[in-house]
Image: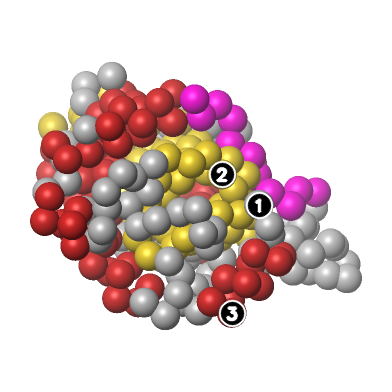
Amino acid sequence: MIGIISAMKEEIQVLINQLQNVSLVVKGMRTYYTGTLFNKKVVLVFSRWGKVASAATTTQLINDYSIDEIIFTGVAGAISDNLAIGDVVIGKNLYQHDMDASPLFEKFEIPILKKKFIETKESTKLIEATKLFLDSYSTYINPISAQNFNITSPKVSYGDIASGDQFISSTQKIKQLNKDLPTAICAEMEGAAVAQICYEYQIPFSIIRIISDNANDNATIDFPKFAGTIASNYAFGILKNYFR
Ligand code: ADE
């Protein structure tokens, strides 16, 4: 069984619509949708926002279903100049940018785990699936939406992600993140929490992040627009290729 998580329903709505033989279970205010997607047995759930919500949901998934793999899909704000709205980031190392138990532990170190980041394992197949999707994105994303977001030649990057319980919407905060975590290229609110739980339970995981905004003062407008219109079309197209 493959667990697919997003933070918001909008980010997996197209996947929910396509799910076959669906059964629903509600636990802890989350709805778990079990069924078949692209001929694979999956369980879809949106965790709600933030590290606590996503860690709790990931733990519930692992404990209640026979999970072989977890895939998180959602949107993120770019904190690298090399990314544009509509690009895709496949997570490499996942950092909690708001973890700081210094001076007891080094800044960013997860206490007791002795790690400053959680690494994903094998991502080649997901990167290839994303490239394939991006080569034909116009069959999944309607041209007016693409135009509205200025998406012309979206690309995939395999890179580090900074997660924290903060919506990033200022250049000052971006500068701080760039200084603190120079390898991180996008910011979001769940990935590193999902990664930590999967690491602790030894479940393979992947993080897909589609850039919805530039984490600047336009982010509060761009982010909901993107998440509400095309984010789940990306998830659908990428996972269709991945599960083939
Ligand atoms: N998810 C999407 N955009 C984001 C941002 N700017 N900050 C945090 N999480 C995000």
- Above or below — where is 152 with respect to 43? below
Dot 2 or dot 3, earlier in sequence: 2
Q: Amino acid at mark 3?
A: Gln
Which residue is depicted at the point 52% across and 43% down?
Answer: 91
Depth order, front residue of 22/124:
124
Q: Position of residue 55 (x, y in %)?
A: 51, 55
Q: Does residue 21 appear in the picture of this structure?
A: yes
Q: Are marks 1 and 2 in contact (CB under 8 Å)?
A: yes
Chain part drawn in magenta: 113-124
What residue is pinned by disc 3? Answer: 172
Q: Position of residue 156 (x, y in %)?
A: 42, 40
**Element on which disc 1 rests:** loop
Which residue is depicted at the point 68% across and 57% down?
Answer: 182
**Element on which disc 2 rests:** strand
What residue is pinned by disc 1? Answer: 183
Dot 3 or dot 1, earlier in sequence: 3
Per the rendering, the mark at residue 159 is 2
Q: Amino acid at mark 1?
A: Thr
Image side of residue 23 versus residue 118, left or right: left
Q: Are marks 2 and 3 in contact (CB under 8 Å)?
A: no
